[in-house]
Image: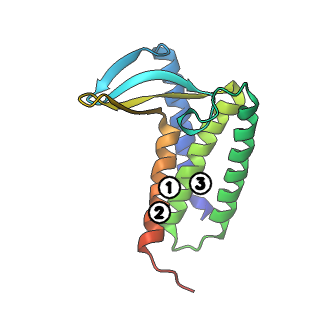
Amino acid sequence: MLKWLWVSIVVIFSDQLSKWMAEASLEEGISYEWINHIHMTLAYNYGAAFSFLGNQGGWQRWFFSIIALAVCGFIFYWMRKLKSDEVWTAIGLALILGGAIGNLVDRILYGKVTDFIDMYYTLEGYHFATFNIADIAISIGAALLVIISLFTKETD
C-alpha cells in the first residue's frame, strides 16, 4: 500500500508552501480575518501540540524530532504490511505521515513549527488553537483510523 505515499507528498508540499506563504505575508501575532471564526495569525510553536513543553530551552526540539522520526518509521512499516483492500487505512496513515514530516521539517530546520490558521468563536470568546496544514492532515488521518477501527470488522 506504499502507492498511497503520494498523499503524504501532497500534504508535505502543501504544508511547506502554505507556511512559506504565511511567513511572507503575515506579521507574527497580528490577526487578519479570513472568514467567520477563522483568522490568519502567524505564530510559532517550540513545543508539541498546543505548545506542550514549548518553553523548555531547546532540548524539546530534538526530543520531539526523534519521536516524530520513530513514528514516521512505524507508519511506513505499517503501510508496507497493509493488505490491498485496506485503502482507507493506507490513506489515513499517509495523511498522518505527511503531516508528521511537514512539522518535522520545520522543527529540524528552524527549531519551531510555523502555525497560522487561528480558529475561535467570537460570541463566547473561545479560542481553539492556531494550527497549520500538517496539523489538519494529522487530525483527519487520525479520525479516519478511529472510524475504521470502530466500524469495520476484523477478518482473519
Q: Are marks 2 and 3 in contact (CB under 8 Å)?
A: no
Residue designated by label 2: 146
Q: Residue at x 44, y 75 (%)?
A: 152
Q: In the image, residue 55 lies at what x, y percent?
A: 65, 26
Q: In the image, residue 151 lies at what x, y percent?
A: 41, 72
Above or below, 122 relative to 31: below
Quadrant placement of the N terminus: bottom right
Residue designated by label 1: 142
| Front in this rendered view, residue 102 or 147 | 147
| Front in this rendered view, residue 132 or 52 | 52
Amino acid type, callout 2: Val
Q: Residue at x 63, y 28 (%)?
A: 46
| Front in this rendered view, residue 9 or 72 | 72
Above or below, 78 relative to 8: below
From the viewer's perspective, tell me whether residue 42 is left or right of residue 103: left
Amino acid type, callout 3: Leu
Task: Report, in whole angstroms, how far the alpha carbon at label 2 lies from the one at label 3.
Answer: 20 Å
Residue 33: mark = none
Depth-wise, is mark 2 or mark 3 nearer the camera? 2
Above or below, 40 relative to 149: above
Task: Report, in whole angstroms, how far the alpha carbon at label 2 lies from the one at label 1.
Answer: 6 Å
Circle 2 crowding by C-alpha within 10 Å: few under 14, some 14–19, many from 20:
few
Q: In the image, residue 67 lies at what x, y percent?
A: 71, 46
Residue designated by label 3: 5
Residue farthest along the bottom direction in this orientation: 156
Amino acid type, callout 1: Ala
Task: Report, in whole angstroms, how far the alpha carbon at label 1 lies from the one at label 3.
Answer: 16 Å
Q: Residue at x 68, y 52 (%)?
A: 71
Above or below, 6 relative to 35: below
Circle 1 crowding by C-alpha within 10 Å: few under 14, some 14–19, many from 20:
some
